[in-house]
């Protein structure tokens, strides 16, 4: 691997140097793997780890602001994550100890893998991505940030500065994944739910999202609306499951899990959600 390397010390320095020929190096756990394997050809690298404007995990008005270069280990250590249980859960199962020590949240969203750990959690929280370039700043909803497999809406001169996650007081947050090898593999499938007013059916707002079943995170807003603000029955979840299966397009060529396994994971996820949101008699056991 031959490339030139520079380490800007401020965001202004970084933006002055960022162009289409430049790759950003955060933790390097995707970039260096892709460069070594030949998937990416890299001529010029800007190491962004030392830039203070890309660091910090802060409670701000209405939510949490996470610097793009914060690692998953830093997320796990932050006391703020107690209020974001789905994010905490995803950070705790992401990769393995060594990967979590290097991998950043910014790198995770910019790599834009369909099963990336943070994708479904950021989607249900309706996170906003703060982006900067020499031309100014802009804020993009997470669901509009990822545009395809390994593709984002970033222009060549843009960088992700931070991720804003709106708070969800007293909401129920869950994150689930299936994986082939515990601790060293990307999720074969993942899902997250965020439920506001979980114990008051008339006020309840249900959000959920699934990874690896489309090229970007799948968030079925119309189906969420049908399940919200009313008591839930197993028949409601059956209907939701059928509607989801009619929309998703899991790849048959996926090396990690078959479409059937992903559909089964969704079925179990919905059953679990039903069990968490309804009194015991309406509960149903997971399918094997
Ligand atoms: C052994 C192993 C296990 C893994 N397990 C998992 C797993 O369980 N779950 C999972 O989701 N991923 C996993 N990964 C993939 C990877 O670790 C994550 O995607 C990680 O979050 C990438 O972050 P990074 O800081 O290392 O990114 P980098 O590799 O530094 O960068 C990734 C891409 O994003 C760009 N980029 C980085 N930061 C910015 C920014 N601020 N603005 C604009 N562009 C930027 C880079 O230029 C590059 O194109 C694994 C990887 C390995 C090698």
Image (spheres, grey):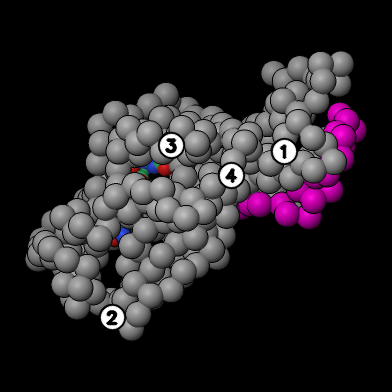
> Is label 4 within 8 A of ligand 1 (CB to nearest ligand atom)?
no
Residue that label 4 marks: 168
Identify the disc placed on residue 197: 1
Does residue 87 appear in this view? yes
Of mark 2 and mark 1, the one earlier in the sequence is: 2
Residue plotted at (63% across, 46% down): 209
Residue that label 2 marks: 134
Residue 39 falls in image quadrant? bottom left
Q: Is label 3 or label 2 in front?
A: 3
Of mark 1 and mark 3, the one earlier in the sequence is: 3
- How far apart marks 2 and 1 lie (CA) works out to 42 Å
Quadrant where the C terminus is found in the figure: top right
> Is label 1 within 8 A of ligand 1 (CB to nearest ligand atom)?
no
Up-down relation of residue 129 to residue 275 (above or below): below
Nearest to the observer: residue 43 or residue 267: 267
The picture places residue 160, in percent across and down from the top left corner, at 35, 63
Q: Is label 2 or label 1 in front?
A: 1
Of mark 4 and mark 1, the one earlier in the sequence is: 4
């Amino acid at each position: 691997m031959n490339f030139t390397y520079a380490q800007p010390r401020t965001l202004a320095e970084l933006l002055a140097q960022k162009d289409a020929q430049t790759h950003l190096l955060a933790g390097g756990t995707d970039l260096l793997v892709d460069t070594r394997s030949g998937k990416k050809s890299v001529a010029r690298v800007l190491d962004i780890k030392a830039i203070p404007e890309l660091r910090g995990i802060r409670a701000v008005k209405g939510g949490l602001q996470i610097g793009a270069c914060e690692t998953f280990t830093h997320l796990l250590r932050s006391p703020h994550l107690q209020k974001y249980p789905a994010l905490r859960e995803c950070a705790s199962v992401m990769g393995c100890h060594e990967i979590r020590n290097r991998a950043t949240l910014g790198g995770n969203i910019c790599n834009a893998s369909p099963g990336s750990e943070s994708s479904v959690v950021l989607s249900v929280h309706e996170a906003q991505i703060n982006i900067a370039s020499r031309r100014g700043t802009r804020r993009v909803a997470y669901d509009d940030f990822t545009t395809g497999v390994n593709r984002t809406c970033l222009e060549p001169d843009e960088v992700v500065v931070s991720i804003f996650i709106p708070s969800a007081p007293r909401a129920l947050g869950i994150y689930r994944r299936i994986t082939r090898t515990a601790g060293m593999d990307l999720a074969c499938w993942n899902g997250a739910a965020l439920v506001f007013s979980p114990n008051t059916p008339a006020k309840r707002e249900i959000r959920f999202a699934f990874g690896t079943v489309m090229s970007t995170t799948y968030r079925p807003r119309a189906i969420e609306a049908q399940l919200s603000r009313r008591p839930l029955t197993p028949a409601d979840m059956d209907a939701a499951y059928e509607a989801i299966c009619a929309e998703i397009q899991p790849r048959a060529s996926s090396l990690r899990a078959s479409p059937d396994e992903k559909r089964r994971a969704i079925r179990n996820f919905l059953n679990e959600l039903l069990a968490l949101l309804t009194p015991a008699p309406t509960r149903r056991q997971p399918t094997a």
